Amino acid sequence: MKLTHPLTRRRSLALSLAMAAALTAALPLSVSAKEVTDADVSNDYKTAGDVVTAGLGQQAQRYSSLNAINTKTVKDLVPVWSMSFGGEKQRGQESQPLVFDGKMYVTASYSRLYALDARTGKKLWKYEHRLPDGIMPCCDVVNRGAALYGDLVIFSTLDAQLVALNKDTGKVAWKEKLEDYAAGYSSSAAPLIVKGKVITGVSGGEFGIVGRIDARDAKTGKLVWTRPTVEGHMGYTFDKEGKKTENGISGTTNATWTGDLWKTGGAATWNNVTYDPDTNLIFAGTGNPAPWNSHLRPGDNLFSSATVAIDADTGKIVWHYQTTPHDGWDFDGVNEFVSFDYKDPKTGKVIKAGGKADRNGFFFVNDRTNGKLLNAFPFVKQITWAKGIDLTTGRPQYVDENRPGNPSEGADGKKGSTVFSAPSFLGGKNQMPMAYSPQTGLFYVPANEWGMEIWNEPVAYKKGAAYLGAGFTIKPLHDDYIGVLRAMDPVSGKIVWENKNYAPLWGGVLSTGGGLVFYGTPEGYLKALDAKTGKELWSFQTGSGVVAPPITWEQDGEQFISVVSGWGGAVPLWGGEVAKRVNYLEQGGSVWVFKLHKK
């Protein structure tokens, strides 16, 4: 046997490595270096091979034209792979995955982010944000997804930071503090890319924070502008050196707030925002005014419980529409505003509109150019706080006796009169995004039928402490169901079909060109329904509750479906009698991918 001297072997290895390095340098960039462009983001709604935004497009219709998986073939849908988020960190999993260049990016509870091979599920890298003690997320340790831009994947964290990582390596590129978590601020929404800027909001309305929308340079994380969503607070723009310039107060100080409560006025922007390129407007939903006890803050309390339209370039408010003025039930207004074309039934004119299924139980259609109310109708069966929405004034027709009572008028001054209110404060619809199909002209709304006993109590603001001034108990309205997926006609206001579910629905919806609607249930099923009739055509048990929205994309000539599974969110924490009713549901943490079985 011929032996080779060790030095010779080392020289041979060094030569081989040098040759390999030279060859690699001479090759074109690998596909992993492909970057996400502004065009990729703008065209996300119509490109089949990727999903680069929350909502499958900036307008968040959550519709894909893909049709290989359709009403006839969906019966052959089978799982391809599943990846566990691992460890003991489960809780609620509300994330929408993103897919680009053969890779999937998906966030998980406790501010984690994973990069996976989209075809095999192989983990490529993982980032686990180090969370400090003392974070105060109101409604579980969830995260709703990330944003892709350039060579970055960007997501927010429970300690109110925004983190950008190299999407191919997982290395942190930049990190920016959104706000002080010790004051109750947090962040769980998916950022949105708009014209090279990353748009974010803040959570923490139950702690007396001040809501706002920020625009940052997506490549550097540096602020471009910030717009508060509580009347009286100053907006700012920022130059490249970080110097800020006043950009006008939001609203007029004390016009709809009395005293100083506006300084801790809530209106958190805790859910995903949307964007319409036709109007260049960012649409942000705003949360409850703080505190919940409405008797402490007379007035409409702008810009809480509203849709706020902000110019993407200037950061100025162009219009607003308040869905629950002087909110006394924690109805918020954070639900997504989805752009679509609305055909006026009286004139036949097609109007650039937006639809919103509000937590207060009413569905609103507004002209997205100016906020004018075009239509409003209930999408749940029982509403006690208002008789309806006046289409002329745009305001609710309140039932005054169904507002929680003033504690100062109580026998001991410590508790106001209790009222039964429907829907409950968890809403006719909460964080779970609906879908719109231009194919059927229908919105698919994951709704819940429940109510609550609610009363007011005295309260004073203290930094970092709960700031409610209210007590409550959530109760189911029916023995056989709470959740119900409804197909809503935005023109007639009628329910076209519905599919009931025993547990409350908490996951989003996907509609497709195959005539299908996909959604998940807390009982663990991912389901596919006929978009026209609501007939269930397929289901799969994922092993834990689905409280996240599905996606679809095409890769190597095949259509894929994916959804994250993992029961949790606000219902087990705040759900009262409803939480007891579904306490048999198990936690989890995984992402599933499906495709058609090849025969």
Image (cartoon, rainbow, N blue to C red):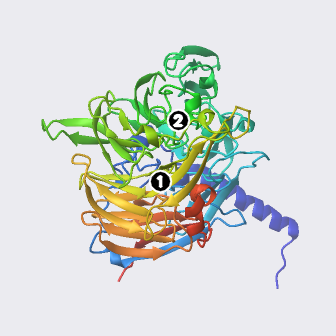
Mark 2 or 1: in front is 1
Neighbour tally class for label 1: few under 14, some 14-19, many 20 plus, Cα within 10 Å: many
Q: Quadrant of residue 241?
A: top right
Image point 61% across, 66% down: which residue? Answer: 589
**Relative to residue 319, is residue 116 drawn left or right?**
right
Residue 162 position, x and y percent, is: 64, 40
Residue 145 visible in the displayed image? no
In the rendered image, the quadrant that contains the N terminus is bottom right
Q: Tell me the element at label 1.
A: loop
Q: Position of residue 157 (x, y in %)?
A: 66, 45
* Residue drawn where x is 35% and y is 66% of the image: 499
Q: Residue furthest front?
A: 411
Can you tell which quarter of the image residue 213 is in? Answer: top right
Q: Nearer the viewer, residue 413 or 559?
A: 413
**Left or right: where does residue 421 sit relative to residue 366?**
right
Q: Give the number of the disc on residue 389.
A: none
Number of labels in the image equals 2
Front-most of 377 and 163? 377
Q: Secondary structure at mark 2?
A: strand
The residue tagged 1 is: 432
Q: With respect to residue 198, does 241 lie above or below?
A: above
Callout 2 environment at 10 Å: few (<14), some (14 to 19), or many (20+)?
many
Q: Amino acid at mark 2?
A: Ile
Q: Quadrant of the C terminus?
A: bottom left
Residue extending farthest left: 347
Above or below for 586 versus 260 = below
x then y, percent, for residue 526: 45, 69
Dot 2 corresponds to which residue?
A: 199
Residue 22: x and y in percent read: 64, 52
User: Residue at horizontal 61%, vertical 36%?
Assistant: 407
Would you say residue 546 is visible in this rendering?
yes
